Image (tube, rainbow, N blue to C red):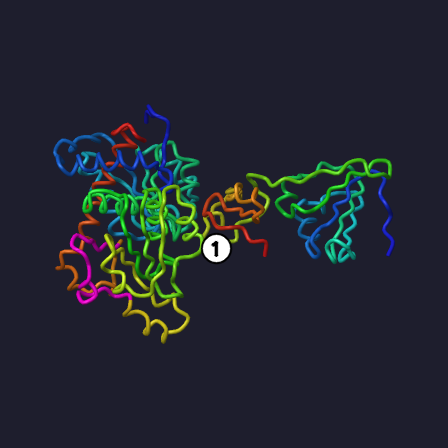
Amino acid sequence: MNIDSIQNGIVLDHIRAGSAMEIYHTLRLDDLDCTVAIIKNVKSRKMGKKDIIKIDEAINLDLEVLGFLDPNITVNVIRHGALAEKRALQLPKRLQGVVRCKNPRCITTEEPNCEHSFYLANPEAVKQGEEPVYRCSYCESAYRAS
Amino acid sequence: MAQARTLRHLIDSRDLSVREIASLLRTADAILAHPKEYAAACAGQKIATLFYEPSTRTRLSFEAAMLELGGAVLGFSSQDSSSAAKGESVADTIRIVSGYADAIVLRHPKEGAPVVAAKYAAVPVINAGDGGHNHPTQTLTDLMTIHRELGGLEGLTVGLCGDLKFGRTVHSLVSAMTRYPGTRFVLIAPQELQAPEYVLDMIRQAPAECSFTLRRSMEEVMPSLDVLYMTRVQKERFFNEADYVRLRDSFVLDPRKLRGAKTGMIVMHPLPRVNEIDPKVDESPYARYFEQANYGKYIRMALLLALLKGEGGAL
């Protein structure tokens, strides 16, 4: 399968296989007018299988949101058809209006104009290599991706 | 309403430091000793009790607390008798009530509602229970009971019995007691209702040195306990009725199970109880759950004084 290489834009590599669509929607890439290619289940030596997203425009990506979704993603910035920069992802301390709290008893499920908000609950443990845990700023439920 | 001090809310019991809790306890002790001296302490002030779901002890104890401080009370006791029934948001209700009262006491079935309230309030907000999440004034009541009945909060063996998985009062009390050195928690529950891992983590990572043991019956640990905190084992928490019937009696306290208890041990319960404490225990020297409910009024008086007047200088 051939997908054209891009001249100026961004390639999100090493996306966990099967999660490219979630990233596409959360980053609101569907709002873009440029070409966006989602490549699923690409063979990978490191991961077995991975997803890739190619964006044919040099947009400003929210790296914190991307770090929250999957901190292992590689962000490659392409200029004039060549790799110009690799950007490191960081875990955000706080996430505003990105994902919704899934606790049905949370006030955010019924209060209008209540922006969903999460905070990183275990920053010290993350430094020791543990998985990050994000909690809702209202009800403190841990965020689950699925 | 003039706000001489920085606006302060009580949303979670962790909002209060150990020092601030000690200050509230001292104020509550002083009120208990000399109630007349406080009879006009909040004269001319009002609290609004906004109860979106029913409550007996919490609402009445807040209202009694404010009345005994010489203040006035307004509010509603169910969602149906408020504009919430017409679909008004918490944010709008709070903005409006901020103009009518000097503090807002809020109970809401949705978790995190007091966080929304605090965002929009121009007066202090006190969380009087938000779903299964937080109930900080119940925790203050529990701490006051232990402080009054046992003379301190450090180095105690605290047995927690019943539904330790879903019981918010238990989680909140564990969180509060982990800040007092030497607390030994004895978690007595059927496997299905044992404390969740995050509660055990709170003890493992406690700021003060604390420990815990997991048990399935109360008789074996009774002689070691300073406090036995009972909670209700609810039928709906079990997958099948057979398990419920098999286990429920193990977690019902009766005079026979109290035989090994040491002198001075106290039995507590957040109330309402259903059948988890045999009424015969009420007459035993260990029962303190009715005193506990009564202490709730005094610690709420201390809290209102602190939030409205800066009494004790702590909050």
* Quarter of the figure with residue B35: top left
Q: What is the x, y in percent for residue A78? A: 81, 38
Q: How many marks?
A: 1
What residue range appears in magenta? B251-269
Whether the magenta-drawn stretch holds residue A93 is answered as no
* Residue situated furthest bottom in the rendering: B242
Q: Dot 1, crowdedness within 10 Å: few (<14), some or many (≥20)?
A: few
> Which residue sits at x=65%, y=45%?
A71
Q: Is residue B150 left or right of residue A104?
A: left
Quarter that holds the C terminus of chain B: top left
Q: What is the x, y in percent for residue B308? A: 28, 31
Q: What residue is pinned by disc 1?
A: A104
Q: Nearer the viewer, residue A104 or A49?
A: A49
* Quarter of the figure with residue B276: bottom left
- Mark 1 is on which residue type? Pro
Residue A119 in view: no
